[in-house]
Image (spheres, helix red, strand yellow):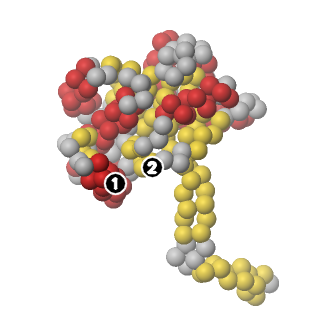
Amino acid sequence: MGNKTTKAFILAGGRGTRFHPFSFTIPKPLMPIGEEPILLHLINRFKSEGITEFVISLGYHSELIKAYFGDGARFGVSIRYVKEDIPLGTAGPLSLIRDEVAKDEYVFLINGDIYTEMSFQKMLQAAEASGSELLVGYVQKTEKSSFGILNIENNAITSVTEKPERTFAISSGIYLVRGSAIENIPVGKFFTAPDLMNIYMSSGRKVGAYRIDDFWMGIENVENLDEVMKRVNATSAKGR
């Protein structure tokens, strides 16, 4: 992990509206994948790579997440919490720990509804090697049209492409942020990761990109959760 202390800052304050009515009583980070909640799978992934210090940003149903995880000791990690009195976006909560992060220290910033099998250590090594203040994890997705696409010029069809595919990069919701970058985040205001990226790009500073080739899924809905559960069950079956 190099000689820099690295912690993970997990965003777990959302309302999980796409999981209603289930999320009225259970916050999305506590939704189960098999026998363990989404958030515990994420914490265990970090733990398997030697990252055991966590800050969890809370909002909706904060008391339930605190009750389940406590200080993290029973899971072999250290957890503390910060509370968003108002929604602060995907980067704004980092301002709550601004004074605790050295300028050359890296912090993982990650959405609490992600399941991934990526190597966080490899991403950290890439950030250190490039000197990135802000490194954005991305995944490549292929979208296939269900229609034939017509190219038209002067009211005449010039070509037809049957159900074309398009590959594009999407943000994974996983970032490495150095303490020097956190200084750009306003305190107590709604501020997103794209806002932080735009500050860097508009001033000519580099925003690093890190491709994630391992399994990744942002759990936005019940269908995503089912897909992850099938993968976990299949992986468990192979291991037996």
Q: Is residue 47 above or below residue 25?
A: above
Which of 227 and 177 lies nearest the eye of the viewer?
Answer: 227
Q: Residue at x 54, y 69 (%)?
A: 144
Left or right: 16 as drawn, with respect to 171? left
Q: Outermost residue, front direction?
A: 240
Q: Is residue 222 left or right of residue 138?
A: left
Give me the residue at 25% from left, 20% from top.
73
Residue 231 disc label: 1
**Image location (x, y in percent) of residue 15:** 33, 41
Amino acid found under the numbered disc labelled 1: Arg
Q: Earlier in the sequence, mark 1 or mark 2?
A: 2
**Relative height, residue 97 to residue 206 (above, below):** above
> Foreground residue, 14 or 45?
45
**Residue found at the very far right of the displayed protein:** 154
Q: Position of residue 56 (x, y in %)?
A: 36, 26
How far across and how far down the image is residue 120, in percent? 49, 33
Q: Residue at x 80, y 84 (%)?
A: 154
Residue 91 in view, yes or no: no
Where's residue 81, x and y in %? Answer: 33, 21
Under mark 2, the amino acid is Phe
What is the count of numbered marks?
2
Pick out the residue farthest to the bottom.
Answer: 156
Kindly identify the residue that appears in the image at 76 percent across and 84 percent down: 158
SS label for mark 1: helix
Q: Which mark is residue 215?
A: 2
Closer-to-camera residue (166/116)? 116
Distance between the Cα atoms at labels 1 and 2? 9 Å
Element at badge 2?
loop
Residues tagged 1 and 2 counted as in contact (Cβ below 8 A)? yes
Structural crowding at the residue carrying mark 2, measured as other residues with C-alpha within 10 Å and reported as few (<14), some (14–19) or many (≥20) = few
